[in-house]
Amino acid sequence: MTPSAADSPVDLIISACTVLVHDDQEGVGFAEDAAIVVRGGVVEAVTTTAAVADLPAVERIEAHGQVALPGLINCHTHAPMVVLRGLAEDLPTEEWFNDVVWPAESNLTERDVELGARLACAEMIRGGVTCFADHYFAMDAVARVVAECGMRALLGEAFFSSQGPEGRERSLEFALRHRGAAGGRITTALAPHAPYTVDDADLAATAGAAREHGLPVHLHAAENRDQTDAGLARHGVTPIEVLQRTGILDTDVLIAHGTGITDGDLPLLERAAGRTAVACAPRGYLKFAWPGTTPVRALRDIGVDVGLATDGAASNNSLDMWESMALTSLVQKSAEGDPRWLTSRQALHHATAQSARAVGLGDTIGSIAPGRRADLVLVDLTGPHTRPVHDLAATLVHSARSADVRTTIVDGRILMRERHLLTIDVPDVVRELEERLPALTDRGHGRRVQRYDP
């Protein structure tokens, strides 16, 4: 219901736009000539432009020719890895890790991580991403950046068993210390790296800590078919079976990639006691020439939410969720041999409501509706590459680009207005980062943070 003009002024009114809306059947539709009323960081009403004409507001945005979408959610990334963008190109997975990325990561300081996170957040804000799930090291620095730049994030301090029990303990300590930080915009997870770098004992201990403290788990598992085949050959179990036997599937878990999930894994995921979700980042799979992709259709059939993601920019080269949305639709059509799957409306649903559920915020964000946090973006569809519009959903998924995002809002706060970033000074970040690159990229020392041997 729209507030009356006699009430105190609302914080923000966005009017004269088209609003993406979700119905009770989880379908996606569009409300024309609509207005969004925001008060206290929350959507108070979605109504008509005429209904808010006389409503007092602290700030108004007239959004003619623009579409208001729920802010996009990057369900799995390693934000600070933008500092390694383009460093390891045209390599198989094993060489990518062992010869370039993990040696370079052994050089990273907390300051490098902070600068990378700032650059990544700037890129995501400019691309209409309002929330991201990050899985990395030195995460205190990432938490500081999130708090300052105004984004929303699910953060986890990654660890390997090779670090000893201290790695697992740091992950728990970080999660407990930062849970609910930045006015509630930061949520946290436990973040074991993967079943091939974290042993069963540490995974079981992680599952126990997650249940004790009410924390989710965010990890890589069954990333590709080679990992699944290696697990079967060495131990007689798939990575998903490892998660089941160690209790990880009894927690709320976000699984990155899952292109190696088998038909035999599906019943385990369906019976999982916790909320289970998978993050799909198709560009990296194509780049590494992995033989499969995330089995989105099979996962949806058993009630597992599939959120969309970019992975880190060291493998994906960008944090562009518009590209991930389009590629997910196209790759799924190819993988299934069915042009009717994944439709544009289905892709939008994965990018919004399902992604929100994947990061544990399904009751908070992911749609523009009364009571939801005011995380939204305005997309300009007046450019020649988006005209004419015969099917608005198809235009958004297959024609619009990240550069078409004009305004990005989180918790009712404008982080970017008309393509101008308001919370991050990119030139300052880039200047300092460029000075640090020689030390950051040196690999002559022979060290690496871990060895990739699935």
Image (cartoon, grey):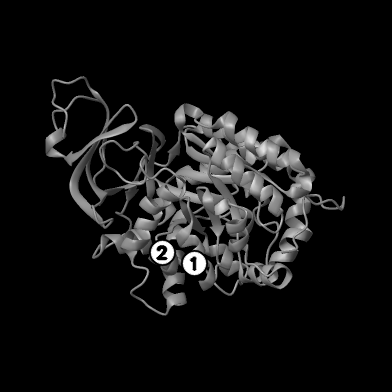
Q: Position of residue 24 (x, y in %)?
A: 23, 52
Apparent side of residue 347 relative to residue 180 in the rendered image (left or right): left
Crowding at label 2, few (<14), some or many (≥20) Cα neighbours within 10 Å? few
Q: Residue furthest bottom?
A: 337
Disc 1 residue type (three-letter):
Leu
Crowding at label 1, few (<14), some or many (≥20) Cα neighbours within 10 Å? some
Above or below, 217 against 239 in this view is above
What residue is at 49 percent from the left and 54 percent from the top?
320
Q: Answer with the quarter of the image where residue 239 lies.
A: bottom right
Q: Position of residue 364 (x, y in %)?
A: 37, 39
What residue is at 41 percent from the left and 74 percent from the top?
333
Can see residue 166? yes
Confirm or deny contact between disc 1 and disc 2 (CB under 8 A).
yes
Residue assigned mark 1: 266
Q: Position of residue 1 (x, y in %)?
A: 16, 35
Disc 2 residue type (three-letter):
Ile
The number of discs equals 2
Tell me the distance, in whole angstroms, between the alpha carbons under discs 1 and 2: 8 Å
Above or below, 152 against 224 in this view is above
Foreground pick, 440 / 107: 107
SS for dot 2 = loop
SS for dot 1 = helix
Can see residue 189? no
Q: Position of residue 277 (x, y in %)?
A: 47, 55
Apparent side of residue 56 relative to residue 143 in the rendered image (left or right): left
Residue assigned mark 2: 302
Disc on res. 418 = none
Q: Answer with the quarter of the image where residue 37 lies.
A: top left
Q: Residue furthest right?
A: 445
Q: Quadrant of the C terminus?
A: bottom right
Apparent side of residue 177 relative to residue 450 in the rendered image (left or right): left
What residue is at 34 percent from the left and 49 percent from the top?
379
